[in-house]
Amino acid sequence: MSKNSKKTAEHFINRELSWLEFNDRVLRQGLSTDLPLLERLKFLAIVGSNLDEAYMIRVAGLMQRREADIRRRDPSGMTPAEQLTAFAKRARRMVDEQTAGIREVLAALREHGLSVVDRGEWTTSQKRALETHFLKEIAPVLTPLAMDSLDPKPLLPGLQLQVAALLGNGKKEKEPDRIVVVPVPGSFARFIPVDSDSGVALARVEEVIAAYLGLLFPGWRVRATAVFRVTRDADVAITDDDVDDLLDSVAEAILDRRRRAAVRLEISAAPDPRLRKWLVEWLELAADEVYEIDGMLDASSLWRIADWPGFDNLKTPDWPPQPPQGMIDQDDLFQLIREEDRLLVHPYESFEPVMRLLDKAADDPHVLSIKQTLYRTSGDSPIIRALERAAGNGKEVTALVELKARFDEARNVNWAKRLEDAGCHVIYGIAGFKTHAKALLIVRREPHGIRRYVHLSTGNYNDRTARLYSDIGLLTADRD
């Protein structure tokens, strides 16, 4: 690197390290004693899900460049290998703080009658109840995998909790120990209520599986167990310039993510060295890509505790969105928008007028066509239902569905197919670009001619996130 380049690099902060400092601001909220306990837990959960995505995309991209022996320095003067080293060092400190923060909040919640009970704390009656629950509700669903007997080895999905066990033959001591992995089904509740004299007590499902794993292997002795979680490379490039069928290309990319290389291993603290060694070698990871967690893996599941009923006193009171001024109890939204532009500020003002406008347009006999961009929307989307109904009512409906919306690709593929089946014209984005715009156009025949009604927004057409995220939206019929 030239002297001028080095001097220039001093003026830049590495992009990935800068992102970590953003996530640190979220962490500070989770560590702040000024916030109610369950609000702190939400922030600590967000830190975890943010890190998951960072490893799947940011770290994975750097690892791809390192493996390709790309040594070109970024504007801050760092090579991909140097960025990975710096990222791991900073992220490890962040994870340690997050884990300590979770431990602190969970300890404080006990004083309020909400406890996550560790395996070593289970009472005799709780052990009996959990064993019964394991045999009746958990064991029939489990699929233990004898990893050293299967060839090729099965693929373990990313971000799924797994329980690894080292089994020894109780009758044949000279027989080699075997390694078994039990995936924790995603359909299971992460926290299992158990009887307690002091409020709500919850056991973690992965600890229940680890505790009673031996019941699945009669004649074998469980020498050691460890809970782990693999993060896989999800940085799959979708090049649409020369792809004839983008829909198939995106669907293939979604499946490809499941088979990508591991970029991170999280494992419960102080695991048996043989289990740790086997996992690291099997996943082909370096030492700085392994995180031993002295606490709960997958912090994003803390949302389930934060939303546990009966503890509203430990949360910030809800601030429900308010009806926009001048739009309360107004049935004719088209007239309101003709009279003047309407600026909506979410989440403080309700997103309901936008959904109601589209809903009315779907049934209004004077509406000729509806055109809309869709980037991300909710699971059971009223937006999609309205567009389907509009097409069924004979209106010209066109939807631009951005299939490359990261981590929403599968959902958007399904929406696109549903809209096509309903008779809508579906455009799968624009080749070479990602359409991030949020726009709705309603064309309506009125006594004085054709009039266009437009909604432009910074936020997605998602009725759920509109209650959380700060965005603005403009409703207008002004041709200028």
Image (cartoon, grey):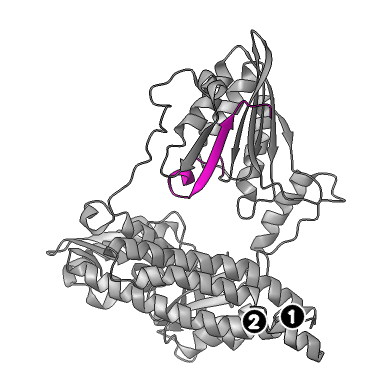
| Cβ atoms at labels 2 and 1 below 8 Å apart | yes
Question: Quadrant of the rendered structure where residue 131 is?
Answer: bottom left
Visible residue check, residue 123: yes
Query: Magenta segment, which residues?
Result: 460-480
Q: Position of residue 314 (x, y in %)?
A: 24, 59
- In the rendered structure, does residue 472 fall within the stretch colored magenta? yes
- The amino acid sitting under disc 2 is Leu
On the image, numbered disc 1 is attached to which residue? 66
On the image, numbered disc 2 is attached to which residue? 84
- The amino acid sitting under disc 1 is Arg
The residue at 55%/85% (across/down) is 89
Left or right, residue 255 beside residue 203: right
Nearest to N terminus: mark 2 or mark 1: 1
Question: Quadrant of the rendered structure where residue 366 is?
Answer: top right
Visible residue check, residue 146: no
Question: Quadrant of the rendered structure where residue 419 is?
Answer: top right
In the structure shown, which secondary structural element does the residue marked by tag 2 occupy?
Answer: helix
Left or right, residue 273 beside residue 419: left
Instruction: Answer above or below: position of 424 versus 195.
Output: above
- In the rendered structure, does residue 221 fall within the stretch colored magenta? no
Q: Position of residue 311 (x, y in %)?
A: 22, 55
